[in-house]
Amino acid sequence: MKKLIGIAAAGAMLLALSGCAGADGGSAAEGGPKPLDELVVGFAQVGAESGWRTANTKDIQAAFEEAGIELKFSDAQQKQENQIKAIRSYIQQQVDVIAFSPVVETGWDAVLNEAKAAGIPVVLTDRAVDSKDESLYVSFLGSDFVLEGEKAGQWVLDEYADTTEPVEIIQLEGTTGAAPAIDRAEGFAEVIAENPNLEVVASQTGDFTRAGGKQVTEALLKSNPGVDLIYAHNDDMGLGAIEAIEAAGLVPGEDIKIVTVDAVKDGMQALADGKINFIVECSPLLGAQLIEIITQVNDGETPEKRIVTEETTFTQEQAIEALPDRQY
């Protein structure tokens, strides 16, 4: 697994763990590590906006159950204010570790400084925060979203390598301000810029939801009737786009090609059926790695600052082969 070496600032955060009181008034760092069944972790989830997020939640909950670690879980319903409220609640409850997947990149410094002052280490999962102070979290576990965008862009670049005509592309963006939406757009744009015939003629957020993908695609097809390809920042929006394309009397995957990111079962089935043309994987199965980070923190060790999950891509043939054993 590809991992990037962390920085020394995390060490100070780990030392602060000694101030995090447990239910018995002790702490994970006093007299050595706590038994895992005495640890309490607060997790603030984005919501349940997609099949990917649902799979991510189930995997995290299952991993904590298997490890015997108490998990306090909250669903932010895609609202930053709900996540901040949940994190502050975890601070008041004096949990041992806080983990969360940020709804958006910015606006976290105040609440993370509160966690730091309380001596509670924070782990970021799936999405990053945009902060100059990297001591506010001990580790960030998740995908390289820019690379995912680059992989999607490379398929488009290869698919239209011999074209001499303009190729019109619609981009279905994720939640505005969210790290995957920003980075997947950036990576995609950088790669397709190599061919001046490839042009994103419209780009609008579908908020990572199937309903949003359908609604946005319906509107954008009316204003861009000559579109050749749709690039969706996740499978759910791509699946919504399929519904809109079919409602318009067109054939998804043929009349309009579709490239998505995630590789959840519904997306993979659409790829196997030829309605999606290419999927870049973004694995939601982060539970075991999160447990590993929390165990390192409990043991007084310094986890790597950035841990990147290994992921692949899928063509139609590869999707057909992978589907029978797909976990999500």
Image: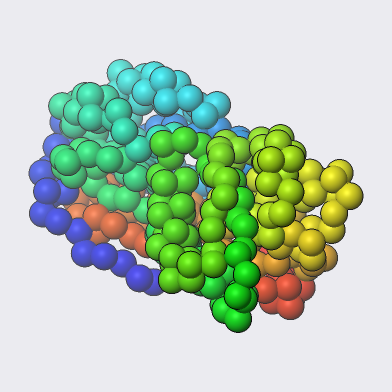
Q: For residue 105, what is the image quadrant?
A: top left
In the image, residue 197 above or below residue 95? below
- 166 or 287: which is nearer to us? 166
Q: Residue at x 74, y 40 (%)?
A: 222
Check the picture and name the quadrant holding the N terminus. Answer: bottom left
Q: Residue furthest right?
A: 249
Q: Residue furthest front?
A: 165
Residue 30, position as x, y percentages in the image: 16, 39
Q: Residue at x 19, y 28 (%)?
A: 113
Left or right of 238? Residue 158 is left
Left or right of 201? Residue 138 is left
Residue 289, position as x, y percentages in the image: 41, 57
Q: Residue at x 47, y 60 (%)?
A: 188
Query: How many numbered badges does the structure rendering display?
Result: 0
Q: How is the image coloured?
A: rainbow
Residue 161 seen: yes
Residue 291 seen: no
In the image, residue 72 above or below residue 286? above
Left or right of 234? Residue 83 is left
Q: Residue at x 31, y 33 (%)?
A: 106
Q: For residue 328, what is the image quadrant?
A: bottom right
- 327 or 126: which is nearer to us? 126
In the image, residue 304 above or below residue 44? below
Residue 172, position as x, y percentages in the image: 59, 46
Residue 155, position as x, y percentages in the image: 57, 72
- 232 or 6: which is nearer to us? 232
